[in-house]
Structure formats: structure tokens, C-alpha cells
């Protein structure tokens, strides 16, 4: 008889901990937020001194790509467009998009995660 009681208590404990785990996941997901998104261009970007740059425009595009890292998607797009450059979303929240292989020295590929720019490169 003691074995049946131990099994019952164990089952109730496992059920209770499973419920607590699921509630924790739900609560954590609802409260998840990214702190301190950047709203101004990153200050640590510099011109690449490498002699194999495609064009002077490409060098400037790479600087802007660096500057938008950490910005929200909307702020990054607005900043890129204010510099007279184009952009395309390469990936967003784990979904990668098909990209053409054409090259332009004034386009930035953006990788977005939870509304923030986590990757940007000039291509």
C-alpha cells in the first residue's frame, strides 16, 4: 500500500512541476523584451583601409551598415534611406529569404531578430 501512495505523490509532483514549467514559459515569453535598442548610429564604425574595396561608395555603405547594428528595424531602414542607400531583409526571426546575386555598392542586407538589427552587411 505504501508503494501506491509513493507513486501517487510522485505523479502529482511531476504534474505540478510540469504545470509550473509551462506557466513560467508563458509568463517569460509575455514579459520578454530587448533592453536599450540603439536609436542613433553606432559610434565605433570606421572606414575600412583595405585597398581591395570595390568603390568609394562601397566603403561608405559598409560604414552605414555598421552604424545600424542594434537599431530597431524601422529606425535602421529610415537611417539607411536618409543616406540615399537601399536595403533588403536577408533574414527575419530565423526565416532566411532568397537573395539575388547581383552586386550594388549602395545596398545593405539586414538580419532582423525580434525587431532589432543583429546583422548588416554591404552587398
Image (spheres, rainbow, N blue to C red):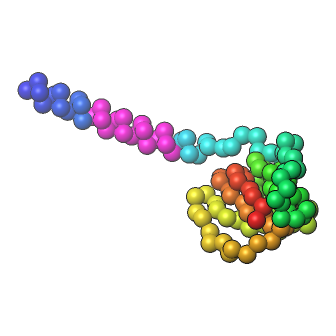
Q: Nearer the viewer, residue 28 or 68?
A: 68
Relative to residue 35, is residue 51 drawn left or right?
right
Is residue 81 among the parts visible in the rendering? Answer: no
Query: In the figure, 2 relative to 66: above or below?
Result: above
Q: Quadrant of residue 78?
A: bottom right
Place of residue 118 in the rendered image (x, y in percent of width and height, measured from the top left):
69, 51
Is residue 19 among the parts visible in the rendering? Answer: yes
Q: Residue at x 46, y 41 (%)?
A: 23
Q: Main secondary structure of the magenta part?
A: helix
Q: Quadrant of residue 105?
A: bottom right
Mark count:
0
Relative to residue 22, is residue 15 drawn left or right?
left
Instruction: In the displayed orientation, state which residue is furthest to the left.
Output: 1
Place of residue 80 in the rendered image (x, y in percent of width and height, measured from the top left):
85, 61
Place of residue 2 in the rendered image (x, y in percent of width and height, measured from the top left):
11, 24
Place of residue 112 in the rendered image (x, y in percent of width and height, measured from the top left):
68, 57
Instruction: In the displayed orientation, state which residue is furthest to the front.
Output: 51
Q: Residue at x 76, y 72 (%)?
A: 103
Report the magenta residues as a range.
Answer: 12-26
Q: Nearer the viewer, residue 13 or 42?
A: 42
Instruction: In the displayed orientation, state which residue is furthest to the top.
Output: 2
Q: Nearer the viewer, residue 90 or 7?
A: 90
Query: In the figure, 21 relative to 63: above or below?
Result: above
Q: Quadrant of residue 106?
A: bottom right
Relative to residue 105, is residue 83 drawn left or right?
right
Amino acid at each position: 500500500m505504501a508503494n501506491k501512495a509513493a507513486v501517487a505523490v510522485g505523479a502529482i509532483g511531476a504534474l505540478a512541476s510540469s504545470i509550473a514549467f509551462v506557466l513560467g514559459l508563458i509568463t517569460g515569453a509575455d514579459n520578454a523584451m530587448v533592453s536599450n535598442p540603439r536609436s542613433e548610429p553606432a559610434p565605433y564604425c570606421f572606414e575600412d583601409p583595405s585597398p581591395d574595396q570595390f568603390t568609394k561608395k562601397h566603403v561608405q555603405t559598409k560604414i552605414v551598415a555598421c552604424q545600424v547594428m542594434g537599431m530597431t528595424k524601422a529606425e535602421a531602414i529610415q537611417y539607411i534611406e536618409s543616406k540615399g542607400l537601399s536595403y533588403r531583409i536577408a533574414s527575419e526571426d530565423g526565416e532566411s529569404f532568397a537573395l539575388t546575386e547581383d552586386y550594388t555598392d549602395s545596398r545593405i542586407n539586414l538580419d532582423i531578430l525580434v525587431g532589432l538589427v543583429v546583422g548588416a552587411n554591404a552587398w
